[in-house]
Image: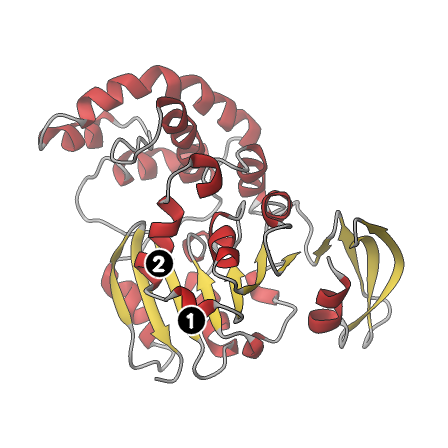
Amino acid sequence: MKQNHFEEYLSTRFELKNIQMKDEEIWSADLISRSDPSQKILIVNGIPRFVSSDNYAQSFGLQWNRFKSTQLDSASGQPLTFNRFWNNTKWKPRELFGKKILEVGSGAGRFTEILLEAGARVTSFDFSNAVEANFQNNKEKGDLFLFQASVYEIPLDLKQFDFIFCYGVLQHTPDPNKSFDILYSGARDGCKISIDYYPKYSWPTCWTTPKYFWRPIAKKIAPEKLLRFIQFYIPLWLPFDTLIRKIPYFGPKILAYVMIPCWNYTHMPLTRRQRKEWAILDTFDALSAAFDYPKTGDEVLQMVLRTGQENVEVFSGSNGYVANLTKGK
């Protein structure tokens, strides 16, 4: 954490003690609450830790630190995250330049990279220790303040942000509606908010049917053990999955009933090695999460409208449903 980030975001609530510096970063220190001196928050490896890493998001910490660069455009050589971000948020790069944006659920920082490239002043957090992967990936790319915290106890005033961005997160929280309510109620009028949400289908699909069939068992398996099993079977199954998936019309329908989870992105311009790595990563992501509550498009719309927000755009995006809104308009 840089000194100027402490002064801007945390100094009114905390004072710094036992500071150790590294490469102009506050690498290790204690944040002592000004209102309750018995409350101490640790800064570890340059990142304030408002929660323990031993929590329900532990599997996400494992996957993003193990596959820290897999989905970054700078690593894949493809504008996959770039296109997903701009096509789904419908924001413009000139809107973000110099603006303060809160990224809720950073993962390894695939979207953080895009935000920083646009010249935004990015504050990003995650419930898991995936923040460590994001720090390694993006600490030199722009104005980035990272911390580890829960969406239910964000240690900042949300009204200071011009944009709030939350993709791939809400469905993995214990109470998605409450999670969205916290972000919406905390935001100032005029703040632009973009969220996405996993889709719920009433018919079999090659993605969701195997996933939700196996999840009750898979999510109970120790993350390391589950990842090893997926690393074993995906390379063996992927060629067969690819052949079936390419059968016109019937291929995806067949895979819906084969019941072998496999996130095989044949439609993406990835090399064979990259496609295998993405398949292992996203199959683990799908099966290991402690919580996974998909919604229909109407349910996503109602989640937003119940806050009193009148104008919202909900549409089918790159990874489920996207909801874009400007608070109070």
Image quarter in which the N terminus is found: bottom right
Residue underneath mark 2: 86
The residue that disc 1 covers is 95
User: Looking at the image, which residue sits at the far left?
Assistant: 249
Quadrant housing residue 66: top right
Q: Residue furthest top?
A: 236
The image quadrant that residue 308 belongs to is bottom left
312 over 53 or under it: above or below: below
Q: Nearer the viewer, residue 99 or 46?
A: 99
Q: Nearer the viewer, mark 1 or mark 2?
A: 1
**Dot placed on the residue nearer the N-terminal end, 1 or 2:** 2
Question: Where in the figure is residue 70, as x and y percent of width and height?
Answer: 48, 35
Amino acid residing under circle 1: Glu
Is residue 72 at all visible to an observer of this figure? no
Residue 145, above or below 271: below
Q: Amino acid at mark 2?
A: Trp
